Amino acid sequence: MRRSILIMGVVCALLLAGCGEETPAATPPASEAPAQRPAAGDHKLTLQVAGKERTFLVHAPPGYTGDKPVPLVVGLHFYPGSGERLRDMIEMDAKADEHGFLVAYPDGVAGGFNALICCGAEDDVAFLKALTDRLIADWGVDADRVYATGISNGADMSFRAAVEATGVFAAIGAVSGGLGGPRLADPGFMPKKPVSVVTIIGGLDQYYEAFQAGLKTWRERLKCAPVKNPASGMKGVERSSARCADGSDLEVYVVADMGHSWPGAKNGQMALPDAPIVATDVLWDFFAAHPRIS
């Protein structure tokens, strides 16, 4: 009985965690757009998925031509939100310009993704597969260096994609989000191929315990063993690492004085500009060190 009550508590907490901001924002309507050729700059592209037109933004760094394989980071927004709002908040484009990778920002339908708890009913796993397939085929993305990140509902979606989009993502980076929901009742709900994970959560986040419960499940199912590593070097930030049986890594940062936020972001209601850690930097450093494990 106590175990059932605990599980229901985690599910209820994660249901609330899918909502990142209180101010609704309608996703811009999809528009007919010709297929664009690979080029540096910002692009709005469309895909047909399950009979519905889906939209996403792509940023390519200066000097990009599509002739050489490059990494891809897929950024998944909060609920309610859009790819454009996430792009403006996390400043991943600047990191892409510095290190030479592509960034894609999918738009969820009605401002949300159908993640582990909420928010929607679309097949967003199929959407992410189609999006990455297109960028691999037409934009020169290196299939061994495809990554997903997100915050809140987007972070939950990155965990779902890690499990269900088999072989697509080499690693994910979840910020203020986690693993939970009814799918966890299936003991086989875990990646079939290695996917490394870095996650950043706040010690003051009202969903903190639910996120920790999800990480405990991940460690148990993937048989992850703790790894000694240097301290974070930042006051108020606790870092822990584990190596899982399939060769993937799990790295967790807990920012003691942070709530439901993206640490280091300067703009947006979920931004925490004075945080002791910059999530965008941490994520890219982790991604760069984790190509797909064969």
Image (cartoon, rainbow, N blue to C red):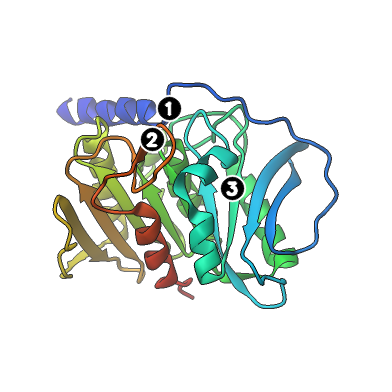
Residue for point 32% across, 66% down: 249
Disc 1 to disc 2, C-alpha distance: 7 Å
Disc 1 to disc 3, C-alpha distance: 18 Å
Residue for point 43% across, 39% down: 267
The answer to whether one can see residue 198 in this image is: yes
The answer to whether one can see residue 146 in this image is: no
Q: Are marks 1 and 3 in contact (CB under 8 Å)?
A: no
Q: Quadrant of the N terminus?
A: top left
Residue 194: x %, y % from top left: 42, 65
Q: Is residue 6 above or below residue 175?
A: above
Q: Which mark is residue 21?
A: 1
Image quadrant assignment for residue 252: bottom left
Residue for point 21% across, 47% down: 255
Q: Nearer the viewer, residue 14 or 205?
A: 205
Disc 3 to disc 2, C-alpha distance: 17 Å
List the residue tagged with mark 2.
270
Q: Secondary structure at mark 2?
A: loop
Q: Residue furthest bottom?
A: 68
Residue type at tag 2? Met
Q: Are marks 1 and 2 in contact (CB under 8 Å)?
A: yes
Q: Which mark is residue 44?
A: none
Mark before the other along the chain sequence, 1 or 3: 1
Residue 89: x %, y % from top left: 47, 43
Residue type at tag 1? Glu
Residue type at tag 3? Tyr
Q: Nearer the viewer, residue 36 or 114?
A: 36
Residue 164: x %, y % from top left: 51, 50
Mark before the other along the chain sequence, 3 or 2: 3
Eye-nearest disc, 3 or 2:
2
List the residue tagged with mark 3.
105
Q: Nearer the viewer, residue 209 or 135?
A: 135
